[in-house]
Image (cartoon, helix red, strand yellow):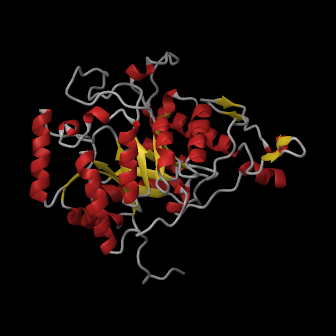
Amino acid sequence: MSDSSSPPALLHLAVALDGAGRHPAAWREPGARAAELLTARYWAGLAAEAEAGLLDFVSFEDGLTLQCASPTGSDERTDRVRGRLDAVLTAARVAPLTRHIGLVPAVTATHTEPFHTSKAIATLDHVSRGRAGLWIQVSGLPHEARHFGRRTGPLDDAELHAEAADHVEVIRRLWDSWEDDAAIRDVATGRFVDRDKLHPIDFQGRHFSVRGPSITPRPPQGQPVVGACGDGETSYALIARSTDVGHVPAHDGAGTRAAVAAIRRAREATALAADPLHLFGDLTVYLDEDAPAAVARLERLDALAGLPYDGNRAAFTGSAGQLADLLLERRAAGLSGFLLRPGVIAHDLPAITRRLVPELQRRGAFRRAYEADTLRGLLGLDRPANRYAARAAA
């Protein structure tokens, strides 16, 4: 029986990094370092700032075409950030420059082979010593599909997410295709690997047929953390079936509770029903000394952009104290953490790490030191057993 008088669990916090920030005019702000957006130094500095704030992880956004506000893939605008570095490679570059924070790059499952995703994220987990994650996303955009030429027509939303779930199942099996002690490295006997501990996965599904095993030994975490965003029933099904962390829009308390309840119901019907699932609120933030200053800054950014900000995500404008109030209130809706999107990275990322974090610490709601060396450890997730090793033992 749990002790009802025990304090609530500490919040988990992460930040989503993309360009100069979520707002389209962010690159024009003082300190935005627009000339450095495509440099390793820029991204390393952001990750270091997030790590100094003891955040659980940073995510790196990605896509398969130039950023665009138009569904056709061409808005012809020249006043927005266009172009980005590969998310997985950026995370790998940042990995040796950080020590504790999780690194979670986005991968579009729709046009990426799961074998490639598996070995890329396994490699990131090795070079970061157990701090890798994967943010799985889908794309039904025709202009993205035209880069690859392998589909005769677009998939509907349900099929896109079903394919992504198969993608995750394949990569999870590939991560397990090497047992933990498969690499012997015994110079005396001349045996580098025990072939009996490498397993074909023999996956046959509607979307993929993958023999295996992987070419990359099992990741240090066993299974790197998998996450996805949800904003509707099909994406909720993907979160429930395939992930360790789901991100849901934190527009309001009622909407958040409904999303959490829907995902929890869907989870109960899956093979992962007994496994922990973190649900994070997804929130764009503009932080200043007080609400009027934050609103004034957002209005100035909107004027630069030529139209009001509409990122199709929940947004907050106000002080760090007011944001702390909101996060603790939304936690009651069933969230265990939050993925914060800085409106302007140069301004709002330091506001998160240097104002919000101390405020939450003062309230006893956030860690004061890193308590684990892996991302799974930071999230309180056990290292899973290898499914194929268990079968061999039986």
The residue positioned 62% from the left and 33% from the top of the image is: 115
User: Where on the picture, by quarter, is residue 367?
Assistant: bottom left
> Could you say where residue 221 lies in the image, as x and y percent from the top left?
61, 53
Can residue 25 be seen in the rendering of this structure? yes
Q: Position of residue 122 (x, y in %)?
A: 60, 42
Residue at image location 44% in from the left, 81% down from the top: 6
Judging depth in this view, the residue of 43 and 8 nearest the camera is 43
Q: Nearer the viewer, residue 68 or 26?
A: 26
Image height check: is 249 above or below 330?
above
Q: Is residue 75 left or right of residue 378?
A: left
Q: How many marks?
A: 0
What residue is drawn where x is 38% and y is 25%? Answer: 65
In the rendered view, would you say 67 is above or below 373? Answer: above
Up/down of 4 relative to 376, above or below: below
Q: Quadrant of the C terminus?
A: bottom right
Question: In the rendered image, which quarter is residue 42 located in?
Answer: top left
User: Is residue 182 found left or right of 216 in the rendered image?
Assistant: right
Q: Residue furthest right?
A: 189
In the image, residue 186 lies at what x, y percent?
84, 47
The answer to which quarter of the image holds residue 364 is bottom left
Q: Is residue 307 left or right of residue 390?
A: left
Q: Is residue 230 visible to the viewer in this orientation of the structure?
A: no
Quarter of the N terminus within the rendering:
bottom right
> As drawn, is 74 to the left or to the right of 117?
left
Spot occupied by residue 132 in the image (x, y as percentages of width and height): 53, 48
Front-most of residues 386 and 157: 386
